[in-house]
Image: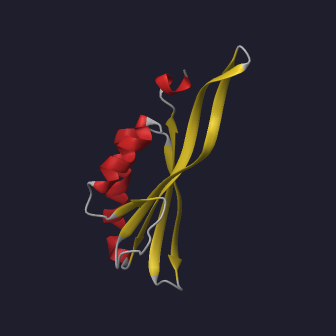
């Protein structure tokens, strides 16, 4: 597991937003988040073998009131800036009518650790 991703998960779990990795068995009421590493985003081949790769993942936050949007965005984006630098983007902001929740999704990219490649 890339150390940048592990640091991102740890930092998100320290916020006032309850976060789970990959999914909740039973989601909390009100505000909550999910973080996951989803797929390989790119790689570097050298001498016929993979020598480096990056991964793409997402951070999703769900909340009840539109007035919470700025707080949710500031909290998550500060952590993404700190851990991922410029390797993230706001992917979507929606209202899920069936659940009655607002949903923000960010996509991020992290690098594999050099020692993981050996």
Quarter of the image for residue 32 reads bottom left
- State the residue at coordinates (39%, 43%): 6
Q: Residue furthest right?
A: 48
Residue 78 appears in the picture as rendered: no
- Residue 19, how many percent across, how many down? 36, 61
- The number of numbered badges drawn on the structure is 0
Viewer-nearest residue: 108 or 11: 11
Task: Locate the C terminus and report the quarter of the image it occupies.
Answer: top right
Viewer-nearest residue: 1 or 59: 1
- Residue 12, how many percent across, how many down? 33, 53
- State the residue at coordinates (49%, 54%): 36
Looking at the image, residue 9 lies above or below residue 72: above
Colour scheme of the picture: secondary structure
- State the residue at coordinates (57%, 35%): 54
Q: Residue furthest top?
A: 47
Residue 92 appears in the picture as rendered: yes
Quarter of the image for residue 84 reads top left
- Residue 22, how many percent across, how many down? 49, 59
- State the residue at coordinates (52%, 79%): 96
Looking at the image, residue 115 lies above or below residue 105: above
Looking at the image, residue 31 lies above or below residue 83: below
Residue 16 falls left or right of residue 31: left
- Residue 59, how many percent across, how many down? 46, 56
Viewer-nearest residue: 79 or 38: 38
């Amino acid at each position: 597991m890339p150390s940048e991703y592990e640091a991102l998960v740890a930092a998100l779990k320290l916020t006032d937003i309850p976060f789970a990795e990959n999914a909740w068995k039973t989601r909390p009421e009100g505000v909550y988040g999910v973080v996951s590493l989803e797929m390989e985003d790119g790689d570097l081949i050298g001498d016929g073998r993979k020598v480096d790769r990056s991964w793409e993942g997402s951070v999703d936050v769900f909340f009840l009131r539109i007035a919470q949007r700025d707080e949710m965005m500031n909290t998550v984006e500060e952590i993404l800036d700190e851990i991922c630098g410029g390797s993230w983007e706001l992917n979507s902001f929606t209202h899920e009518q069936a659940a009655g929740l607002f949903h923000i999704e960010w996509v991020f990219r992290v690098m594999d650790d050099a020692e993981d490649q050996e």
